[in-house]
Amino acid sequence: MAKKRTKAQEHEKLTESNISHVIKLLEAENPITKKEACDILNITYNTTRLNKIIEEWKKDKDYRDKRKAERRGKPATDTEISNIVTGYLEGDSIQDLSKRVFRSAAFVKAVIERVGVPTRVVGEAKHEPAYLPDACIADDFSEGEIAWSAVYHAPCEVVKKLEGKIYEEKYSSNCYQVWIKEKVVDANTGFGLAGGGFNAFVPAYELGKLSHLKQYGVNVESL
């Protein structure tokens, strides 16, 4: 039977970085008390649970370190590239992807840059169009094609090309109606739901091709 893992409550601070910080303090030359350790983790004072949290963290770290060592120096496989690209475009952080594929954060960043993945921005930068790598730049898109919106920083489905000189004169580019895909989460279950999004009208230079990512096994249509 699989060993039951320690489950964190919403108010508890059981992030990997915080647990690592607590372990360092407990193993320091002048260590903190276990009561202080529980306070930092924001858990009820319970030495048995504290020991279990630390034991699980160390086992997980040992496992990740071994897997990283096995892959160190080896080129990325198509499966790794697919996992990295898909996760990145769907909103996963570089650190989360690094843990998932047992590679360094630098390795993950290098893969994203090398295969031509659109830049995903956060914070204040979301108000500006993002950089599109050369592999994504195109003038023409097909109806039903899944592309990337450099303005809305999300995958989108091309609905149709907008006909008329007014668009060419205004934007000096082909223009398209697209459906910007948004992740909708069920408030009861926490699971993502399909179908979220909104219509937008954008010039071709604000759209990025994603078809080149299919060669690595990325299911572009499912983004």
Image (spheres, grey):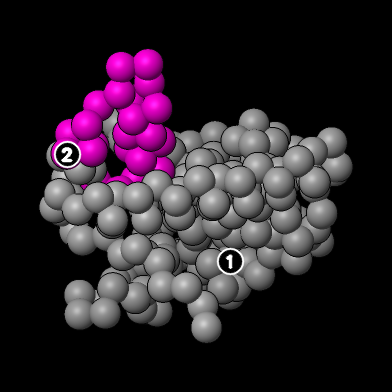
Asked if residue 36 is positioned above or below residue 137 in the image, the reply reads: above
From what the image shows, is residue 125 above or below residue 9? Answer: above
Read off the residue under disc 2: 35
Residue 221: quadrant of the picture: bottom right
Q: Residue furthest top?
A: 29
Residue at the far bottom: name it.
Answer: 1
Residue at 21% over, 61% down: 9
Q: Name the residue that disc number 1 marks.
A: 146
**Considering only order in the chain, which callout, 1 or 2, is on the residue closer to the N terminus?**
2
Amino acid type assigned to the residue bearing label 1 in the image: Ile
| SS for callout 2 | helix
Along the viewing direction, whichever of 152 and 111 lies nearer the viewer: 111
The magenta stretch spans residue 25: yes
Classify mark 1: residues with Cα within 10 Å, few (<14), some (14-19) or many (20+). Answer: many
Q: Position of residue 219 (x, y in %)?
A: 66, 70
Q: Where residue 72 appears, x then y in whole percent?
A: 79, 38
Residue range in magenta is 12-37
